Image (cartoon, grey):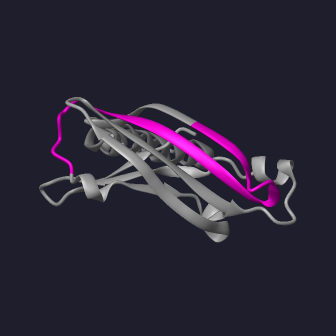
Amino acid sequence: MVVRYPKGILNVKKIFVLLLTLFIFTGCSNTTVEKEENKDLQIADAMASIGGVDETLDKQKLSYEMTISNEGKLPVVEESIEIVLTDWINERLMENEITEKKFNEDNIMVKGYVIFDTKDLSKKDILENEPFIDGIKISTEDDGEIFIKSNF
């Protein structure tokens, strides 16, 4: 005896199997790799402020200070620390300087500033393009490079 199912039931089965397969692949994917790689170095504290330069509205100075926790005590190359700016700031960049770096046993403190062109931009135009800093790039002594995403 042959049992025949209506065509609609077979399509429902196929869709169910497809969804189940997608669900399994999604559940098995590894989405925490980046966080695991950077768990030793993270931005623990950050502060930034913007102000005019030389009493003109054509330039703005973004001053920043960040503390990076180094709980894993990774050996880093001190000269390698680099602030990664957003594309919007890079297009208007006039000056970018790290003014101070302090290396303690379990953290790194970085201070600096960025001067960028704001000619013909309103305060609203500037604020709509936040964040200004993507993060920090640091090289380790074993030739590894770590990017730490900024939260501001």
Q: Residue 63: say if magenta.
A: yes
Q: Main secondary structure of the magenta part?
A: strand
Look at the picture and state if 7 lies above or below 86: above
The foreground one among 122 and 16 is 122
Going by the image, does 51 lie left or right of 73? right
Q: Residue 72: say if magenta.
A: yes
Residue sitting farthest toward the front:
54
Going by the image, does 75 lie left or right of 25? left
Locate the N terminus and report the quarter of the image it occupies. Answer: top left
Q: Is residue 1 visible?
A: no
Q: Is residue 81 visible?
A: yes
Residue 151: % across, % down: 53, 38
Q: Looking at the image, which residue is at 34% across and 54% down? A: 81
Q: Looking at the image, which residue is at 47% across and 47% down? A: 18
Locate the C terminus and report the quarter of the image it occupies. Answer: top right
Q: Looking at the image, which residue is at 19% across and 33% down? A: 72
Look at the picture and state if 117 lies above or below 54: below
Going by the image, does 70 lie left or right of 7? left
Residue 112: % across, % down: 49, 49
Q: Looking at the image, which residue is at 58% across and 45% down? A: 63
Stretch in magenta: 48-76
Residue sitting farthest toward the left:
142
Residue 131: % across, % down: 63, 47
The foreground one among 119 and 32 is 119
- Numbered-mark total: 0
Residue 129: % across, % down: 72, 52
